[in-house]
Image (cartoon, coloured by chain):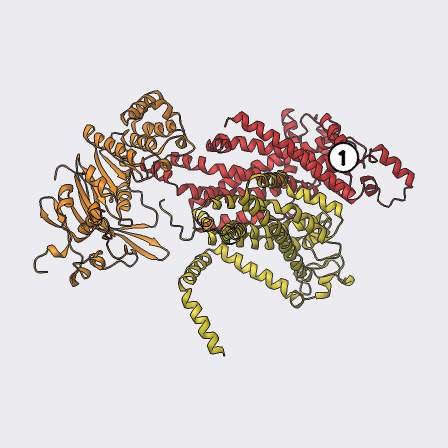
Chain colours: A yellow, B orange, C red
Amino acid sequence: MSNLIKKRVNKWLMEHETVLKEYKAAFLSLWRNPLTKMGLILMGVLIFVAIFAPYLAPYPEQGLGKSNMEERLQPPGWRHLMGTDYYGRDILSRIIFGTRIALFAAVIVVAFALAIGIPTGLIAGYYGGKIDEIIMRVTDLFLAFPALLLAMVIAAFLGRSLMNALIALSVTWWPWYTRIIRNTVLSIKERDYVYAAKALGISDWKIILFFVLPNSLAPIIVQATIDMGTVILAEAGLAFLGLGSKAGSPDWGLMVYEGSAYITTHWWYSFFPGLAIFIGVLAFNLLGDALREFLDPKMRIRRWV
Amino acid sequence: MKDVLLSVEDLYLDFKTYEGIAKVLDGITFEVRKGEIFGIVGESGSGKSVTALSIMGLLPRNAIIRGGRIIFEGKNLLEDKSIYNRIRGKEITMIFQNPSSSLNPVFKVKDQMLNIIAHHLGYQEDEAYEYALDLLKKVELPDPERVLGSYPFELSGGMAQRVMIAMAISTKPKLLIADEPTTALDVTIQAQILNLLKRLNRDLNLTIIIITHDLGVISYMCDKVAVFYAGQVMEIGKVEEILLEPNHPYTKALLKAIPDPKWRGKSLPYIAGDVPILINPPTGCRFNPRCEYRKPICSEKKPKLIELNSGHLSACWLNERGV
Amino acid sequence: MKLRDFIIRRLIFSIFVIFGISFITFIMIFLVGDPVTVFLGHGGYSEEDIERLKRTYGLDKPLYVQYVNYMVKLFMGDWGKSLRTGRPVLNEIIVNFMSTFELIVFSSIIAFLIGLYLGVLSVKYENRLVDHIVRFISISGVSFPSFWLGLVLMIIAVNFGFTAITGRIDPYIKEVYPFETITGMYLVDTLIQGNFPAFFSALEHIILPALTLAAYPAGSIARMVRASMLEVVDEYYILAARASGLPEKIIDRYILKNAIGPTITIAGLNFAYYIIGAFYVEWIFARQGLGRLAGDALFHLDYPVIMGITVFVAIFYIIVNLIVDIIQAFIDPRILKEEGS
């Protein structure tokens, strides 16, 4: 049985040899850059930590909120590598669990924004005319204003919870993607292969799905990756203001807030969670940069000095 | 010889790339006499533009010159790079393929021209302005005042190329290199620009090197022509001789590939095969894989450029006795 | 198209935006429940009191009427009164805004200079160690949470004995060397009046918040400068310019003028960040400003203030973007041409 599978796999490998070679070359050229290497590694670490949190955290129950009053506000030491918080909970464990919140927020908000943004952008760009006008006016509205402020207001009025914060963020986030996709579609729409497809009588939605969309994805992928980092930052910011996760949750932003009252005496309380936010965002930014280079017309030969 | 203005001797050039070292120029040799219009013709990747950049000293950072000399007015430019500060843009000037892209989009034409005039000739602003107007008239631009006050995107391709030419002759150079000057222009404009260049060559005694892939341009403009292929020089000679009595198999094949109405209904002749990738180029004569007269020695040793008769040189083993 | 038409089109658009944003905010507030009830919470007020309050604030009228009333009053300068303090909203906003404005301007100058320098450095040493280091710094800059960075800088500063970490000025100095409020910006006012002790105190107090706030834009600008310069350097016209023998200094100018366009766009987009970032930084460093005001208003759900700040920020943001666009049109004349078609 496995022989048959091996044969099939080998056959596929041989057929796609040139494409695979290209990807291998591109990946290697990425790996060459120390920054992108760092991004890929950090990303891997984040995902790993999020998945295996209960097994990695030294004090998993404390990570989830159980207090440990005897060891309150301990500085970093052997028992607690990053110290403990006001309730004696091990900060390292809480940070590990906080990874799940951060990644969850990042994925949810960006997914939602894409789910709304891509279709609206495709429709606006492809059909143009009145629909385009309306959609673009709406997005212009959202984009003419600091989105985060709007999100803050929404979150404030919806009430304090992680989901409300995410809803608030999602609502203010999608217009960016609509704009990007719409502009990309506009430039693709005039390309010859689209006209050729139309001339062949291929239906509109098929054209959109199979011709226009795949070619518009590159800038979106880059933006989405970077945005996931930005969402982590934004969600932490909202939590810091008390507009996000409820008290007791191992949300990184919330932890920074809690620790800010003790900043001059117990520096570790705010320092480590904030550092976690930084590393999380950094990972996505590095990855986004790497993707941008990867998806750029490969073989960018520098012509002259 | 006394009236040789530029002599390129045995120029070897490599490019460092991620895939390896591309041997872009493999022993380029040719001579340009004063007052000549010299043509360099070849397919893409033949090394024509790179040769021009080498002469101008504008090679990118990953270019390595492995050997050879570029002698201009008796001095080897490759020996002392500081010579370029005096020469580039002043004694030797260059115009490029895409005139609209050759002008800085955010500066007016006036600023760009005056920068050059001021830098090389030291004129003050008013003098320079008058001089610029003069130059634009010389290149047959109507309404030079308006052109000076315009931004590059407001000019047509033909007008932009005339502006480029004006800038190129502003310093009264000895040599002008034109890299595919008309490729991006309409056919009617092409003719005008070529005529302009011819006139300048005559009136200003301006030596011109024209780089092109278009044999029609060569036959119209040039006195002498060098045929390049994959970084090697195949044949050099007077234009009439090359076109009417080509010696080298590559030149012959090129000329045969020009469509001729008498072949209506038949398929067009073409040269089989592809231009080689220069990271692992063919050994010996680089045309040998596609040459119908190929002999074993062709892939073993590179043929030298041999003078067949006065001024006509060809690099082919067929010309050597006993092959 | 002409510059004048461009501006007019923008202004019309801006009005539309102000209406749109204020409408959305307005709707949201009422979605949750009428503001008075929300604000009062479960304070145990009687039904009559609530009704009375509602009538005072005109909340018993239908929604669209309320909105129209609000907008009309807005344009006439009456932005309502804070539910919490009773003071006129517009006054509160303006007084606090000048402090925030000072911080933002100071910060953006620092950010621009640092960003430009880093970006150019990065290009000069492309792909060598310096480039990688600078790129890391830039990416870090945009990855720092501003509230955390502020705290960290505070810790470091205190460890070095630097104590100017809260407020806009040392209150002792303010008493001993008083100065008048002219613009509301301490740095400007003290300098105008030649009050150097106060000036230096204000400077001391603004440096940490400004650095914190500048981290993100500096990184963002550095990356943009690098990216657009690399693109420009590859362009034909730079090669052509070199071929014409122009000296490096002029070539650099040619490159810069083309590269700066996208950079200014980014600088403009960063303004959204400045406003939000300022909120956090003011909070951390206990500075008076719009951020503190907004924070309090959001916490207490003080809706007139929230509405006021939203509209105000929208106006400010629009003005800034307009200025940025005009500057860009000057730098790159092609923009006006494109807008017209």
For this rendering, which residue is in front, B6 or C46? Answer: C46
Q: Which is more toward the observer, C28 or C269?
A: C28
Tag 1 subunit: C
Above or below for A109 versus B31: below
Give the x, y percent position of residue B55.
25, 42
Which residue occupies 41% across, 62% down?
A: A21
Image quadrant where one finds the C terminus of chain B? bottom left
Q: Which residue is mark 1?
A: C64
Question: Residue C287 occupies which quadrant of the picture?
Answer: top right
Disc 1 residue type (three-letter) = Tyr
All told, the count of numbered labels is: 1
Vertical position of residue B294 compared to residue A213: above or below: below
Query: What secondary structure is marked by label 1?
Result: helix
Quadrant of the image containing the N terminus of chain B: top left
x and y percent of residue A87 in the render? 76, 59
Where residue C67 sits: x, y (%)? 75, 34
Q: Nearer the viewer, residue C104 or C266?
A: C266
Q: Position of residue C195 (x, y in %)?
A: 65, 27
Q: In the rendered image of this protein, does residue C306 appear above or below residue A117?
A: above
Q: Quadrant of residue A60?
A: bottom right
Q: Residue at x 39, y 25 (%)?
A: B149
Query: Which residue is depicted at the point 76% across and 35% down?
Result: C64
Of C23 and C323, nearer the camera is: C23
Task: Determine if residue C169 is in view.
Answer: no
In the picture, measured across the screen, residue B205 lies left or right of residue B276, that is left
Position of residue A238 in the picture relative to residue C133 (left or right) = right
